[in-house]
Amino acid sequence: MAGTGDKGIFGFFGPAWLINYVMAGNSGGTKPGEGTYGDWAVCDPPVGFFWGGTWLLANKNGANKDAVGKFIDWVTLDASDTGLQYMWANGTLNGEGGTKDAVASAAVMAKSDGTLDFLGGQNMFDYFVPANDYANGKNLTQYDQTINDQWRDQVRQYTAGNKSREDAIKDFKSAITDNLDVTAD
């Protein structure tokens, strides 16, 4: 991500949080011109994806139902400039200069400034708002976490040089077959 490897990197696929919480910190700089900071941009993906979500739960027997209800509304539905999602999207949750981030509300992102120096001044929300159309749970299964964990383990072993590509794929298929009682072909 910092551009220090033997070969240049064309790009990365990932969720919105990859930008601020992984790439920026690993770009080799903190301002444009340092490492690859400022050389990146967001583009439309060739295919969309959805992986889970964020949940907010409250105890139905709680003593402060009105306060809890107001808090849940502020976190999830309040699209005003004092709502959590607006402040999070605009980097003002803890005052000016905070991290701007994609939020659940497309309405909030559409009226927010997602411009980042890390992205060469690009407004990331111009791409994330239409990408929300891909977020649906049609392809979720009870097997997703197991499959993801097994895949990640094999990829890490391969990229660390601990096994060949062929062995990693073979071991992934074997783990899926053993753990889920399905054939992974």
Image (cartoon, rainbow, N blue to C red):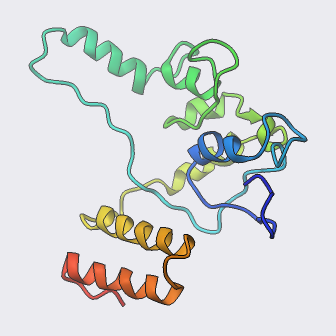
Q: Residue at x 27, y 67 (%)?
A: 143
List the single residue furthest toward the right.
33
Q: Which one is nearer the viewer's eye here, 26 or 147?
A: 26
In the picture shown, does residue 86 fall above or below 8? Answer: above
Q: Quadrant of the image for the N terminus?
A: bottom right
Dividing the picture into quadrants, the one containing residue 142 is bottom left
> Total of numbered circles in the picture?
0
Tell me residue 125's x, y (percent): 67, 40
As drawn, which residue projects farthest toward the left? 61
Where residue 77 appears, x then y in whole percent? 42, 25
Residue 118 visible? The answer is yes
Position of 113 relative to 167 (above/below): above
Please name the residue shown 84% across and 49% down the image. 39
Extreme residue toward the front, this view: 162
The image quarter in which residue 99 lies: top right
Residue 35 placement, left or right of 92: right
How far across and how far down the image is residue 52, in percent?
Answer: 38, 51
Residue drawn at (65%, 45%) of the image: 19
Which residue shows up at 56% across the image and 17% down it? 93
- Counting from the top left corner in percent of width and height, residue 128 is at 62, 46
Classify residue 11 by image quadrant.
Answer: bottom right
Q: Nearer the viewer, residue 70 or 175?
A: 175
